[in-house]
Image (spheres, grey):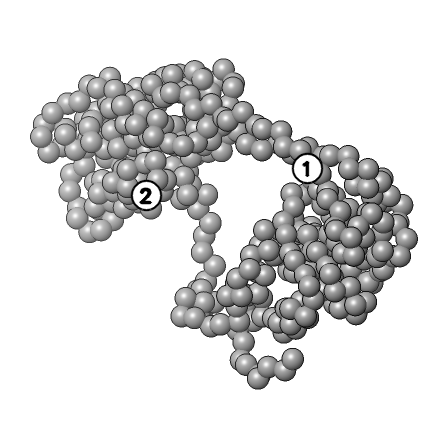
Amino acid sequence: MSNPDKLLWKHTDSGDLQLSNACFFKLQPLQDLHWAKLIWSPNIPPSKSVLAWRLMHGKVPTDENLKISGCSLPSMSSLCCKSEESSFHIFFECEFAIKIWSWFANCLDMVLQFTSMEDMWKICDINWSPQCKIVITSALVNLISSIWTARNQARFNNKQTNWKSSISFIIASTSLSGNNSKKTSSNSIRDFIILKHFNVTTHHPKTPVIKEIIWQPPLFNWIKCNIDGASKGNPGLAGCGGVFRNHVADLLHCIAEPLGIASSYHAELCAVMSAIEIAHRLNWNNIWFETDSALVVQAFQNSNNVVSWNLRNRWHNSLLLFRRLNGIVSHIHREGNQIADSLANFGCTLSSYTLWQQAPIFISDSLAKNKLGIPSFRLCT
């Protein structure tokens, strides 16, 4: 099938050039701030996240930052009345802040030492459970908010806030975030103790369900093709594979093909396109394609799904061939697609397309298992 020539923007999968693509293409690479995704969370009020964001960017209106902006005033920390006011002093060195950080360190059973603002977010990088990580992140954001609130009360209302009252505020605010989160905790005592410090109910993970997966042969006079793609890095070194079997599970053909550097989705599409081309060439009209990629199944069900521009012509031609076949496409969990997976991974190691009409030794055990109807098992949460 011939299509009219079309200008393509090679830096996008769709081939379309949009204003946002042009902006990102011309922008200098942005600094990767590992803490940014921690601060902005649906479980933390945005008003408090904004304060943490401003602090990390040096935009909190402390005396130090006001001087940088040209507003030169005599400076004194309103919390301790002993030192000049700077962001690092208020939030980490002031006696008021030290008491709160000491309490927080006791909650985590850790020794906390900070030499820069970024150091406090490294606490979140420890191997916490998802719920515990949300609680600790929320506690950090609320801790910053409580210190800043106490500073403003002292500066503008001449009210000294007791550090224990700030701790009560941190616990109450963090409790809301932790209890409203849908994240689950682990069964460790460490996580349990931390959650209890902040009055957070433990969200236990759901008990996994064991699901039996059995490969089913096709009907009489039908052929079934299991296909898969693999990418060592996504994108990375990629390959695809497929196996054709008849109604008694006897092998007819199997293939493995190297694809160079490609994504997993690219490899999955190449696998199904190769299988369609083989079926059409060998006049296997009653054909059942089975894949463990839900995206490939969706690509057949919805013609509006975007296929990368460098595959688009071949994909459209494959769809035309598929419509001439009496074919179906279905999904199976990867536990039932182990032969195609082995062939795809083997394809990553090859230098050229390979076709077998007798089973290679590395899939013989899986073929026998499928033929006997021996199940595989999948843990579903």
Q: Which amino acid, by three-letter code, is at mark 1?
A: Ile
Near-viewer residue (106 or 37): 37
Q: Is residue 84 above or below residue 290?
A: above
Q: Earlier in the sequence, mark 2 or mark 1?
A: 2
Name the residue beneath numbered marker 2: 53
State left or right for residue 125 relative to residue 262.
left
Q: How many marks?
A: 2
State left or right for residue 78 relative to residue 292.
left
x 37%, y 31%: residue: 181
Q: Point out which mark residue 178 bears.
A: none
Q: Which amino acid, by three-letter code, is at mark 2?
A: Trp
**The N terminus is located in which quarter?**
bottom right
Q: Are marks 2 and 1 in contact (CB under 8 Å)?
A: no
On the question of residue 345 being in view, the answer is no
Q: Residues within 10 Å of mark 1 (few under 14, many from 20)?
A: some
Near-viewer residue (79 or 40): 40
Q: Residue 77 sits in which quadrant?
A: top left
Which residue appears farthest toward the bottom when viewing the image?
4
Name the residue beneath numbered marker 1: 213
Q: Residue 375 sits in which quadrant?
A: top right
x 25%, y 49%: residue: 68
Q: Position of residue 331 (x, y in %)?
A: 63, 49
Q: Nearer the viewer, mark 2 or mark 1?
A: 1
State left or right for residue 326 relative to residue 72.
right
